[in-house]
Every structure is written in C-alpha cells, then in structure tokens.
Amino acid sequence: MDRFTRLCKAKGLKITPQRMAVYEALKNSKEHPSADRIHKQLMPTFPSISLDTVNRTLITFARIGIINVVEGQGDPRRFDPNREDHHHFYCLSCTKIFDFHDPDLEQIRIPDQVTRMFTITGKRLCLSGYCNECRHQKAETAAPAN
Ligand code: ZN
Ligand code: MN
C-alpha cells in the first residue's frame, strides 16, 4: 500500500477517483501548482470537477499530512507533494517553485531568540529570483517574444 492510500485509510478519508487524480496530478508536477492549475489539468478527464472541490481536496490532504501548503508570494495557495526536508526557489517571473537540497543548509542553526519566541516545526529556506528559462527569456526579449 502506498503512502497516499495508507494515510487516507488512517485518517478515515475515503479514496475516490477524483481525490486520487488530484493527488496524482500534484505528485507528478514539479512546480508546486495552485488548485487552479490542477483543476485545469483535470478538466479533460473529470469535466464535472469544480475548482472548489479541487481546492477543498488539497486543503484536506494538507490537514491530514499527505501534502504541504507552501509559501507563495501573494499568489493563490500553492501545494507540495514532497513532505521531506528540502528547500525552495521561487521564480518571480513565472512563479514556479523549484525544489533543491543542500546538506549544509540542513544544518542551519536557528537563533536562540527565535526558538525562545516560537515553537519551530519546520525549517525551510525559500530563495527567490529568476529561473533559468525566465533568465534566458529576459535576455532575449529586447524584441518581444510570442
Ligand atoms: Zn521562471
Ligand atoms: Mn517542494
């Protein structure tokens, strides 16, 4: 039994084809998509699925610990199927969020003043800037593309 099935069972969440499709779509995406993005992707297969259903499904998954909600930047809420420790890079242009790992960064020490003030349950660095694709586009678009 995979992790998804196991967690749904443990939390008493019924596994429906729609829920499964939402999870699969998120899992197969590398961009930390929004509910809207996943909804658009599922429309051809599930024409009757509403954005609200997709959104509520994702929030339920996050609540029971199957996925994470990740830091957006004023965007709609974004989701992450990867629950392991890792860091993010956020592209200010295309708004994709990329994963990266770095052993040194895992060792970051949290300042005492912060641990005194808060209970820390997660530690993730989120860098921002321009991804490779957008960087190249910027260089090329002295003349407007598309
Ligand atoms: Zn980009
Ligand atoms: Mn991630």
Image (spheres, rainbow, N blue to C red):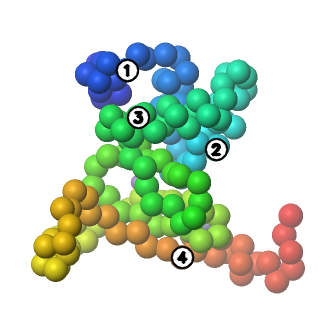
Question: Upstream in the sequence, badge 1 or badge 2?
Answer: 1
Question: Residue at the location (41% across, 16% down)?
Answer: 14
Mark 3: which amino acid?
Phe
Question: Upstream in the sequence, badge 3 or badge 1?
Answer: 1
How dense is the environment of label 4, judged by Cα within 10 Å: few (below 14), some, or many (20 and up)? Answer: few
Which residue extends farthest front? 117
Q: Which mark is residue 142?
A: none
Mark 4: which amino acid?
Gly
How dense is the environment of label 2, judged by Cα within 10 Å: few (below 14), some, or many (20 and up)? Answer: some
3D distance between C-alphas at marks 1 and 4: 38 Å
Are the residues at dot 2 and dot 3 in contact (C-beta closer than 8 Å)? no
Q: Which mark is residue 37?
A: 2
Q: Is mark 1 within 8 Å of ligand 2?
A: no
What kind of element bears circle 3? helix
Mark nearer the viewer, 3 or 4:
3
Q: Quadrant of ligand 1?
A: bottom right
Question: Upstream in the sequence, badge 2 or badge 4?
Answer: 2
Q: Is residue 72 above or below residue 68?
A: below
Drawn side of residue 31 relative to residue 41, left or right: left
Residue 145 placement: quadrant? bottom right
What kind of element bears circle 2? helix
**Residue under label 3:** 61
Mark 1: which amino acid?
Leu
Q: Is residue 96 visible?
A: yes
Question: Residue at the location (71% across, 81% down)?
Answer: 139
Question: Residue at the location (27% across, 55% down)?
Answer: 85
Question: Residue at the location (87% across, 79% down)?
Answer: 143
Residues 122 and 24: in front is 122
**Residue under label 4:** 129
3D distance between C-alphas at marks 2 and 4: 22 Å
